[in-house]
Amino acid sequence: MLNMLEKKNQPKEPKKKRPEGQGPIMPLPPKNSLFGNITTAILILLAIVFATSLFRDLTTESTVIPISELARDINEEKVQKITIEGDVLDVGYKDGTVKESKKEVNTPLTDTLVNYGVTSAVLGTVETEVKSPSGIGYWILSLAPFVLPILIIVFIIWFLSRQVKGAGMQAMSFGQSKARLISPHDKKQRVTFKDIAGAKEAKEELSEIVDFLKNPKKFLDIGAKIPKGVLLMGASGVGKTLLARAVAGESNVAFFSISGSEFVEMFVGVGAARTRDLFQMAKKTAPAIIFIDEIDAVGRVRGTGVGGGNDEREQTLNQILVEMDGFEPHEKVIVMAATNRPDVLDPALVRPGRFDRRVTIDLPDRNDREEILKIHARMKPFAEDVNLEVVAERTPGFSGADLYSLMNEAAILAARENRKKVSQYDLIRAIEKVMLGPERRSHLLTKKEKEITAYHEAGHALMASVLPFADPVHKISIIARGRAGGYTLKLPLEDRKLQSKKEFLDDIAVSLGGYVTERMVFGDLSTGPSNDLQVSTALARNMITKYGMSDKIGPVALEGEGGRVLFGRGVEEREYSERVSADIDSEVSRVMNEAMDKAEHILKENKKALDAIAARLIEVETIEREEYEKIIIAHGIIPKKKQDIEHQV
């Protein structure tokens, strides 16, 4: 548990509102795409025209002279050679220059020159060559002015129609399933039970599914039928999706995975169509596994929604129910689903014949955490001082995803400091980074704020060390991390599944240690204890309304795990009177006041130890467990050991 000191209130950033619209019904091209396509086509056309004109200009660099000037130059014996190509004349002069002229169409050049006064004798001194236009180049140059514009227009029409056709094809495929398929032959994505640490009971339950898919005859001969649906339940990050993939990998069958939210669209009927398409695909490749992640997105209790969008979700759920246990039985298609909210699922979905096998996956214990850390450590070079057993002990409540993030953050910290190996120090820092966030050393406290923060955290730590049922202190720091201005890291000596009333009361007193210390030492209060008050008040209310730990109220559960959600906020359905509500408020106030009195009494008795811890925090900003225990031992406080906890239990 963490007791975090929050800094002074700062104006909260306004929450970003979700867009009111949910987008178009059918997938269309992006906005202004038609205008953009037309613009692109026009630009291409202009570029071609520009290139053609430029080419024409480059090829017509020679000087053009009239036929009369050519006749005069021949008479003056300046012309050496004339090349005739159609009606174009290339004239080569004796001085090396080349000029161009044109003759009359369908009239011989000799007749034209004679008409301009050129005698036959002078004309005989000029070399004349006639080139007949032929070949592919001639036809390209001749037809280009006519064919090129037509081709450009055809290309523009094809380009625009292709966009419209693409949108139409998307509309036609709107009801197709978006499930991702992992083939049994894909070795790179294959996952087996050997790749998963912990979750022993869950793997034993799922091994029956694997056995059926491998050898169904053994079950069918004795009249047994394997469950059609397997519901994986557990907190976020415990490995539900990984276990489902492992079942497919062990069975060597096709694995179709899809999220529950991918079924639901604003267009009514799409979800049901995708469901039918998904099951048809699975039946064609049977034996196969269909995995629906976050099934609570589509499988919530029917009849509780607001608005027309609920109709689409209910139709999708109805189709899933029919496919799983309807008119068309499927013996070799097993549906697996994962959720961390099994309490909101529709009863028809979890009845026998549908998801009749429910597997609960708990958070890993210390041994499981160590095994998970070893798996994530396979590809990372470690220094000699790394001890994964210590890391597992300091990470109670961590899920498999948290442990993966821890190992990754440790590697990032080592790489940031240009080191080739990950050390134990990196792993310890990564634990705090995952739990609280990165350090904010650039955020400097004033001398007064630093003193208040030090005494606040010293109050938490001292209360945890004196109270018999509180967890021992591992670290105290007044360095800002995440949203916390300082923190006291308390970790249990062993994993616990149950908590007693005495432990809850001591936890509340520890949470109020900082509040009482500020009031006792400075005669004033800051905004720092705000989070402590929220946590302790919520714990006191749960003791009374959920766990029946109040003598006045008695063994009655007055509140559940959570109410309905309306307009984005939780709405509790109270099933008790106003008088009982007043009694609850009175009991919560009593528990909080008794815990505050206990904290005030303990802190006054150990004022010297409190001052010593605070002074050391102001000096060094962070105190580890070994140094902290030396300080409290010097003031007559004995640290808790594992045997002390076992004796109390």
Image (cartoon, rainbow, N blue to C red):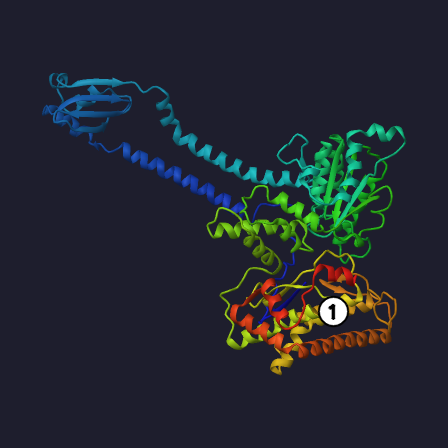
Count of numbered circles in the view: 1
Q: Residues within 10 Å of mark 1 (few under 14, many from 20)?
A: many
Q: Residue furthest right?
A: 223
Q: Is residue 333 left or right of residue 236?
A: right
Report which quarter residue 306 is drawn in: bottom right
Farthest residue to the left: give it: 76
Q: Residue at 78% across / 37% down in the picture?
A: 207
Is residue 78 shown above or below 461? above
**Observer able to see residue 231:** yes
1 over 89 or under it: above or below = below
> Picture coordinates of residue 223 (x, y %)?
90, 31
Q: Which residue is mark 1?
A: 506
Q: Is residue 462 left or right of residue 286?
A: left
Q: In the rendered image, which quarter contains the C terminus?
A: bottom right
Tag 1 secondary structure: helix
Q: Is residue 359 above or below residue 552?
A: above
As rendered, which of 508 and 248 lies closer to the eye? Answer: 508
Residue at 87 percent of width and 66 percent of height: 556
Residue 486 in the image, given as x and y percentages of width and height: 59, 68
Query: Residue visible at 17% across and 18% down?
Result: 127
Determine the image quadrant of residue 580: bottom right
